[in-house]
Image (cartoon, grey):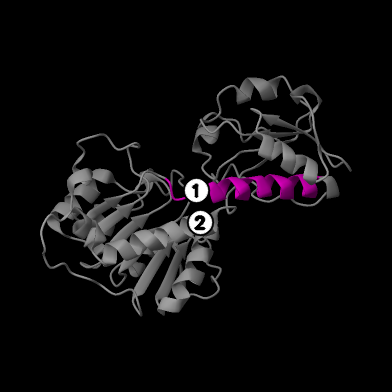
Amino acid sequence: MTTSEPRVAVVPDWPLAADAVVSAGGRVVPVEEAEGLVWVDWSGPGRLGALLEASPDIRWVHLPGAGIESFLDAGLVADGRTWTCSKGAHSSLIAEHALALGLAGLHSLASSARASSWEATRVTALAGQPVTIVGGGGIASALVRYLEPFGAHVTVVRRSPEAVPGVQRTLTTDKLHDALPDARLVILALALTPETRHIIATRELDAMHARGWLVNVSRGGHVDTDALVDALERHAIAGAALDVTDPEPLPDGHPLWSMGNCLITPHNAGSSGAVIALLAARVHDNVARLGRGEPLLGVIDPVAGY
């Protein structure tokens, strides 16, 4: 698989990715000549399975984003090839959006922006408050850095017991409920797997602080939407700030749209112009590593599901 000049196909054509391949010392070739494939069809697997079946020499496949559920569901990733994705490449950008959503919630910007007359709103400070981040990857690491100036007391909940640098405590997922009662922000930044689907449901929402905000920048399936609607109606929590929903897109007329304690952005936490350059940089780094015979970045574990 290792070569001094990796032969990489880019499908469909994306000039920025092709430039990244060349600048990393690789050569852009047709699929039938390739040992590596950069798949940049943002809509999902599409015809990827048939293409790979006809191209047995391809040993490495790179997917454009961080979300890979559709590729796993299609049964493609566990085919013996090395699969990578762009997880971690745009973590700082998504963490920035998560912080913006959290601050908007705590400062009642959702209800204030909808107001048509002068009225008092409740503001909760972030400084010195407990914050729980569910997920221990790149987004969490970036959030820890961004939260440091606020003096927030950060808990990270993750699969692994390995301590996350810069946080007050690291808990495993089975201890999630220990991290909910005091947190003013509960931020979801983890991969969606069968084990993490509906990781936030009625029991978890009822365990949260009454002035706590739920922030989701990962996948809508992490939250039981019906349970969330109920919790917001009951004011069991202060509110929810969501960049992702289930279903997605959220249908017109859904109760979440009109709730004053819910703030929704259209899954664009990682969609600024900056992210394109970050994803191209991941392609560059992996092609260079491929040429040097080094481990690739963002390798997908088909068993773990991310």
**Left or right of 49 on screen, residue 123:** left
Against 167, residue 33 (above or below) is above
Q: In this view, which residue lies farthest toward the front?
A: 117
Magenta span includes 270: yes
The residue singled out by tag 2 in the image is 93
Residue 82 in sight: no
Residue type at mark 2 is Leu
Viewer-proximal residue among 82 and 141: 141
**Residue 272: which numbered mark, if any?**
1
Against 180, residue 71 (above or below) is above
Residue 245, image x, y percentages = 34, 43
Q: Residue at x 51, y 32 (%)?
A: 73
Quarter assignment of residue 177: bottom left
Magenta span includes 235: no
Q: CA distance from mark 1 to mark 2?
A: 8 Å
- Reading the chain from its start, which is encountered first: label 1 or label 2? 2
**Left or right of 10 on screen, residue 70:** left
Against 294, residue 79 (above or below) is above
Position of the N terminus, as image quadrant, is: top right
Residue 264, image x, y percentages = 30, 49
Q: Residue at x 49, y 48 (%)?
A: 272
Q: Residue at x 76, y 44 (%)?
A: 287
Residue 114 in sight: yes
Residue count near mark 2 (Cα–Cα under 10 Å), binned few <14, some 14–19, many ≥20: many
Q: Nearer the viewer, mark 1 or mark 2?
A: 1
Viewer-proximal residue among 287 and 227: 287
Q: Secondary structure at mark 2?
A: helix
Q: Are marks 1 and 2 in contact (CB under 8 Å)?
A: yes
Residue 216, image x, y percentages = 37, 53
Q: In the image, which residues are magenta? A: 268-290
